[in-house]
Image (spheres, rainbow, N blue to C red):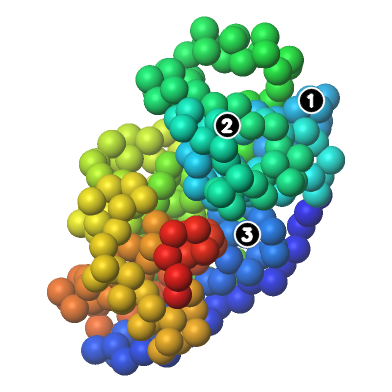
């Protein structure tokens, strides 16, 4: 497997009120190509695919998907063929200007494209059967990578030294990362998720994988929905990078750290609390669309 451990907790050196401290778990440094939660989610899926004798792995994602890029790199490193089904057909004949898809292809991934209408039905057996007719038998990883094998991986994020933190905060996409953190947390800790998407549907998605009740979601910092942001968020992240040297992406982690600091201002966190925020990687969001 492609296991590496370069993760450490780095204190966020900014002025905070009431004796509160924030540390950043640098999961973004876990691996130079397959960083953060994507590494965690893919690890046991690839091991299971190989154990079951599959030579191909198929998954889904958007045109700028961190998951697509990470799956392609992991497949190359681990010697398993990868197929990425991309939402929307607009780049089917011209993806050369898209750095994410170009790198995925360079890493050996075969791309397929679906209309948005069909993509919404991607979990249906009829759609999966059509994909098998086209690509042959494959091990299926869902969009975003969240399944039981992914949760097994994200349960490894928290280490023994992390149980001294009062709060653990993470961005939430499909819910797999926070589910693993909830499962491996201690009862005296509060796990707080900051969804990057609109809506409260994630509660049910997360409950499928957890039994602990020491968690909550803060739904106010999605900035309009998935992959949406504004100049306020971008300016905040640029300044935070100048002040701390830590770059957060505007799609997931940037919304989370913005939310954490806003909630501190509102008094959500108790005095003298120690907060651990999980940096799950994905800084290609800057490289693709915005310049730091």
Image quarter of residue 157? bottom right
Residue assigned mark 1: 54
Element carrying mark 2 = loop
Q: Is residue 139 above or below residue 185?
A: above
**Does residue 101 appear left or right of residue 175 in this picture?**
right
Residue assigned mark 2: 93
Image point (63%, 69%), residue name: 29
Q: Earlier in the sequence, mark 2 or mark 3?
A: 3
Q: Earlier in the sequence, mark 1 or mark 3?
A: 3
Measured as percent of width and height from the top left, residue 265 is found at 19, 78
**Does residue 242 appear left or right of residue 258 in this picture?**
right
Q: Foreground: 127 or 103?
A: 103
Crowding near the residue tagged with mark 1, few <14, some 14–19, many ≥20 C-alpha atoms within 10 Å: some
The disc label shown at residue 35, or none: 3
Tell me the CA gap for discs 1 and 2: 29 Å
Asked if labels 3 and 1 touch by Cβ distance under 8 angstroms, the answer is no
């Amino acid at each position: 497997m492609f296991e590496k451990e370069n993760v450490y907790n780095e204190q966020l050196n900014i002025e905070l009120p009431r004796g509160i401290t924030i540390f950043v778990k640098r999961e973004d440094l876990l691996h130079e190509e397959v960083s953060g939660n994507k590494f965690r989610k893919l690890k046991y899926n690839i091991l299971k695919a190989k154990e079951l004798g599959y030579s191909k792995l198929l998954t889904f994602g958007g045109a700028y998907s961190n998951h697509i890029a990470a799956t392609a790199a992991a497949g190359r490193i681990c010697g398993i063929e990868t197929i990425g089904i991309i939402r929307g057909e607009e780049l089917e004949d011209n993806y050369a200007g898209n750095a994410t898809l170009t790198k995925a292809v360079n890493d050996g991934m075969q791309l397929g494209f679906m209309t948005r209408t069909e993509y919404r039905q991607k979990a249906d057996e009829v759609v999966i059967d059509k994909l098998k007719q086209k690509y042959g038998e494959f091990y299926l990883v869902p969009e975003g990578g969240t399944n039981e094998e992914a949760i097994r991986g994200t349960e490894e994020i928290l280490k023994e030294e992390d149980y001294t933190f009062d709060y653990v905060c993470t961005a939430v996409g499909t819910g797999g990362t926070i589910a693993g953190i909830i499962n491996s947390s201690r009862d005296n800790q509060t796990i707080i998720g900051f969804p990057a998407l609109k809506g409260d549907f994630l509660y049910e998605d997360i409950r499928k994988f957890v039994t602990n009740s020491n968690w909550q979601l803060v739904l106010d910092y999605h900035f309009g929905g998935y992959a949406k942001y504004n100049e306020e968020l971008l300016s905040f992240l640029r300044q935070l990078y100048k002040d701390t040297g830590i770059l957060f992406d505007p799609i997931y982690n940037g919304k989370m750290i913005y939310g954490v600091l806003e909630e501190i201002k509102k008094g959500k966190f108790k005095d003298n609390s120690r907060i651990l925020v999980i940096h799950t990687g994905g800084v290609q969001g800057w490289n693709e669309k915005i310049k730091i």
